C-alpha cells in the first residue's frame, strides 16, 4: 500500500468522515499531499557523503473560504499530512532536520478550491544562508545547518579507532559498519529485534564514515530519539533510540 493510499485510508476514519463533506467540490487533502511530495522532490540537495536533504517544514495556504470550513479539523489534518510526508521521505531514503512539520494557514487572495504549498529546511533557529550548493528556489526560505549536519550530528572519523555500536536495554551490543543497516523484526532486517512493537523494516542506519543518520522507514509505531519522534536525524554519542519497547543507546569509542 502506497503512502497516498495509507493517507486516504486514515482520512476515511478521521472525524467520522467529516473530511469528505468539508472537501466536497473543493480542494482535497490528497491533492495537498501530492503537492508536498512534489515540493520535496523539487528542492532536494545533495550533501557531503551523498546524503539527500529535503525540506521538513511545509506551510499550506488555503483560500479564506476553504480555511474557514476546515478550521475545526486543521490540527488533525496537519498531523496526518506530516505523518504521511515523513513516511514518503523515509521510503525515498532522504534526510531531513528533525521532525516533519505541517502548518495550515489562511491564504488571502486565493480562490475557493485553490491552495499553495511552500517548503523550507527548518532547524528551529534564525534565518540564515542555505547550505552550499542548495538552490532554494522562488519563495522558499532556507535555514543554516547547525553543526554542519542534519540534526546537529557530530562528524566521526572512519577507521578502526572508531567503534560505533548500539547497546540494547538488555545489554546486547550491535556493532555498526559503514553502509546501511536496516533495523526490524523481519527477515529482511540486518539487525533483527524480537519485539512485536517493531515493524518488519522499522528504521535504517546509514554510516558514511563521517556521521551516522537514523531514518524511520514509515514504521507503524514510529521511532524516537531522546524522547522525540523523528523521521530522520543524525545521531550523537549517548543518544537513546526507542523502537517499540526496545531502547538502543548509541555509543562511539576511540
Image (tube, rainbow, N blue to C red):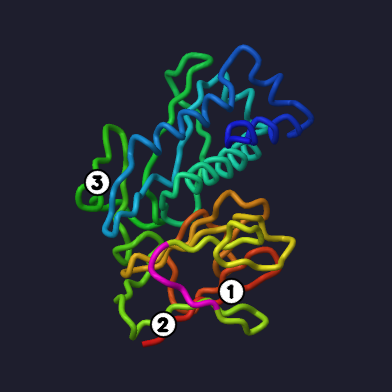
| 214 left or right of 218 in image | left
Extent of the magenta region: 174-179
Number of residues whose C-alpha sits closer than 10 Å to that of mark 3, classed few (under 14), some (14–19) or many (20 or more): some
Q: Which comes before the other along the chain, label 1 or label 3?
A: 3
Q: CA distance from mark 3 to mark 2?
A: 32 Å
Residue 195 vs 78, above or below: the answer is below
Q: Position of residue 221 (x, y in %)?
A: 67, 55
Please tell me whether mark 1 sits on a helix, a strand or a loop.
strand
User: Do labels 1 and 2 touch, CB within 8 Å?
Assistant: no
| 81 left or right of 244 in image | left
Q: Position of residue 182 (x, y in %)?
A: 53, 60
Q: Quadrant of the C terminus?
A: bottom left
Residue under numbered circle 2 = 163
Residue 25 vs 183, above or below: the answer is above
Number of residues whose C-alpha sits closer than 10 Å to that of mark 1, classed few (under 14), some (14–19) or many (20 or more): many
Number of residues whose C-alpha sits closer than 10 Å to that of mark 2, classed few (under 14), some (14–19) or many (20 or more): some
User: Do labels 1 and 3 touch, CB within 8 Å?
Assistant: no
Residue 248 — which label? 1
Q: On the image, which quarter does residue 174 sit in?
A: bottom right
Q: Which comes before the other along the chain, label 3 or label 2?
A: 3
Q: Position of residue 203 (x, y in %)?
A: 55, 58
Q: Residue at x 24, y 41 (%)?
A: 135
| 175 part of magenta stretch | yes
Q: Quadrant of the N terminus?
A: top right
- Of residues 204 and 21, the one drawn nearer to the viewer in this rendering: 204
Please tell me whether mark 3 sits on a helix, a strand or a loop.
loop
Q: CA distance from mark 1 to mark 3?
A: 33 Å
Furthest-top residue in view?
25
Residue under numbered circle 3 = 134
Q: On the image, which quarter does residue 245 sit in?
A: bottom right
Residue 65 — which label? none
Furthest-left residue in view?
133
Amino acid at each position: 500500500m502506497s503512502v497516498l493510499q495509507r493517507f486516504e485510508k486514515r482520512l476515511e476514519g478521521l472525524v467520522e468522515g467529516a473530511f469528505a463533506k468539508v472537501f466536497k467540490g473543493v480542494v482535497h487533502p490528497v491533492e495537498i499531499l501530492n503537492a508536498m511530495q512534489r515540493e520535496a522532490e523539487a528542492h532536494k540537495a545533495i550533501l557531503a557523503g551523498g546524503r539527500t536533504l529535503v525540506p521538513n517544514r511545509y506551510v499550506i495556504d488555503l483560500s479564506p473560504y476553504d480555511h474557514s470550513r476546515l478550521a475545526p479539523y486543521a490540527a488533525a489534518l496537519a498531523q496526518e499530512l506530516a505523518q504521511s510526508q515523513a513516511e514518503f521521505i523515509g521510503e525515498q531514503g532522504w534526510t531531513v532536520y528533525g521532525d516533519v512539520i505541517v502548518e495550515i494557514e489562511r491564504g488571502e487572495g486565493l480562490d475557493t478550491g485553490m491552495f499553495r504549498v511552500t517548503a523550507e529546511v527548518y532547524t528551529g533557529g534564525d534565518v540564515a544562508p542555505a547550505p552550499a550548493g542548495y538552490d532554494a528556489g522562488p519563495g522558499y526560505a532556507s535555514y543554516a545547518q547547525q553543526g554542519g549536519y542534519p540534526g546537529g550530528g557530530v562528524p566521526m572519523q572512519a577507521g578502526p579507532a572508531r567503534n560505533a555500536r548500539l547497546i540494547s536495554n538488555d545489554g546486547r551490543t550491535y556493532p555498526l559498519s559503514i553502509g546501511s543497516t536496516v533495523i526490524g523484526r523481519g527477515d529482511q532486517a540486518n539487525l533483527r529485534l524480537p519485539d512485536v512493537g517493531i515493524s518488519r523494516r522499522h528504521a535504517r542506519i546509514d554510516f558514511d564514515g563521517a556521521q551516522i543518520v537514523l531514518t524511520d522507514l514509515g514504521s507503524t509505531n514510529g521511532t524516537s530519539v531522546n524522547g522525540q519522534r523523528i523521521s530522520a536525524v543524525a545521531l550523537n554519542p549517548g543518544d537513546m533510540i526507542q523502537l517499540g519497547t526496545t531502547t538502543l543507546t548509541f555509543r562511539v569509542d576511540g
